[in-house]
Image (cartoon, rainbow, N blue to C red):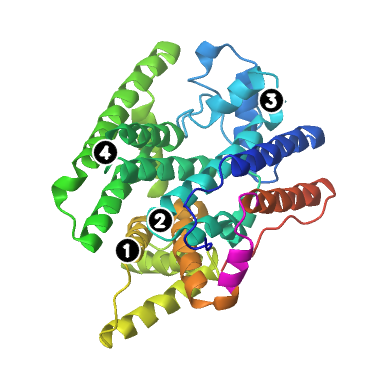
Amino acid sequence: MSAATRPVSVGFPRGALAWGLVLAAGWASLAAVGYRARDPDSRLYAEISARMAESPVRSWIAPEFPPGWYMSGLFREHPVGLFVPAAILGVLGYPAAQAAYALNALYQVLTIVTLQRLAATLVPGVEARALGWLIQLLPIAFTFRIRANHEAALLFCLLLALYGTERSRREPRWMLLTVAGLVGLLLVKGLVAVFGPALCVLWLAARRLTSGARADSDRTAWLGIAAGVLAMGATAAVYELLYRLATGEPFWSFYATRQLGVAAATGTDSGLSGMLSNLVWYLGRVVWFPFPWSVILVVALWRGRSRSLAQTPRPDAGTRAGVFFTAGVALLFVGLFSLSQRRADRYIFPVYYAVGAAGGIAGLRLVPPLRRIAERLDRPWVPAAVWALTFTAHLLAGRLGLPTVKLWAP
C-alpha cells in the first residue's frame, strides 16, 4: 500500500504513545529547569495560574492582578478559561509556576493532532499526516514555542469546533465536539469567541459550494452550531452569575467596555488611511509568519487559475473547499482587525495556521523533492520527534541565556 493511499489515521496507538512520551518529557523538563518565559503576557498569566492554585477554588472565577504588574485589583482582561486547567494541574502537584507552560504544550500537541484529522477530511492521507511536522516549522510556531498565553488554547478550541462540525455532517454525536470547542473558546478568549460560529458556518459553506451537496445534507452540523451558540449564551449567563456571587460586581459589561475601548484606542492613524495602513501591516504578517508556504500558496493559486483558463481539469472538491475556507479565514480576521486602531501579531493567529496548512499542502504537490521527503517521513512518531527537538532547542537556549528563536517580522 502506497503512502498516499494509506488510511488517514494519524498513527494511533504508536503516534499517541510517541506524543505521550515527548509531552511527559517536556513537562518534566519545564519543571526541572524552573522555566519562565521572557514574554510579559506569559509571565503574567503563569503567575495568575500559580496564585490560583494556592487559593480557595471558590475564588478562582475572580483572580486578581499579582503585585507589581501594570494594573491592580480584579483581573477582567479575559475570562478564566485559560487559568483554571493550569491551576488544577498545580493543585495536583505539578510545580504551579510552570503549570501554564505545561498546559500550553498540551494545547500545541492537541492542535497538531486535530489539524491532521481535519485536513484528512479534505486531502489524501500522506498530505494530512505531513502537516503534523510541516506546521511546526512555521515562523509563528518558533515565536510561540513555549508560552503561557491564549493563542495555543484558542487555536485548539477553533479546530475542535471545526472538526466537530465536519464529522457531525454524517454522525450527529460529533455535535458535542462543536459545542465543546465553542464553549471553550468563550471561556478562554471572551469576545473573540464570535469567530468560532462564523468559522464553522464558513466551513460548511466551503464544503457545500465546492461539492454541490444539498443544504439539508448538513442539517445535523447546522444543529451542532446552533447548539454551540446556545451553550455559549448559557455559559456566559452562568459565568456572570458566579462572578457576581464571588465579587458583587459584573464581569461581561466591564470586560466588553474595556476590550472595545482598547480596540478603539489611539496609537495609529485613524480613518481610511489608518485602515489601509493596518491592512498592509497585517498582510505582511500573513506573508511572513506562515512563510514559505504563504508564497507557495500564492504560486499554486496562480497556476490553478492558469489551468482553469486553459480548461484543464479542475482541482478536487476537497482542495477547492480548503482554498475557499483559507481565503475566508484570512479575509475575516484581516478585514476586521484592520478596522482596529491597535495592532498585534497575535490578533490574527489562526490565519497563520490556515495559510500555513494550505500552503504546505500546495508545496507537497508542487515540489517533488518535498513530496518525497514527506513520504519518507510518513511515520506516526515523526511529528512528535519534531516537536521534541524544537521544544528542547528552545528550552535549552533560554536556560543557557542564549537568544531564543524569535524570527523577525516585517
Using the rendered view, name the quadrant where residue 99 is placed.
top right
Residue 139: x percent and y percent?
Answer: 60, 61
Q: Which residue is mark 3?
A: 96
How far apart marks 3 and 2 lie (CA) works out to 36 Å
Q: Amino acid at mark 2?
A: Gln
Q: Which residue is mark 2?
A: 341
Mark 1 element type: helix
| Region in magenta | 370-381
Residue 275 vs residue 391: left or right? left
Above or below, comparing residue 274 to residue 78 in the picture: below
Question: Is there CB contact under 8 Å for labels 3 and 1?
Answer: no
Foreground mark, 4 or 2, reads 4
Using the rendered view, name the quadrant where residue 35 is placed.
top right
Residue 311 vs residue 270: left or right? left
Q: Which residue is mark 1?
A: 271
Residue 222: x percent and y percent?
Answer: 22, 41
Q: Which mark is residue 225?
A: 4
Q: Considering only order in the chain, which callout, 1 or 3, is on the residue closer to the N terminus?
A: 3
Question: Is there CB contact under 8 Å for labels 1 and 2?
Answer: no
Foreground mark, 1 or 4, reads 4
Please indicate, yes or no, whether residue 69 appears anywhere in the rendered image: no
Foreground mark, 3 or 2, reads 3
Q: Amino acid at mark 3?
A: Ala
Q: Looking at the image, which residue sits at the far bottom?
A: 310
Residue 25: x percent and y percent?
Answer: 74, 38
Q: Considering only order in the chain, which callout, 4 or 1, is on the residue closer to the N terminus?
A: 4
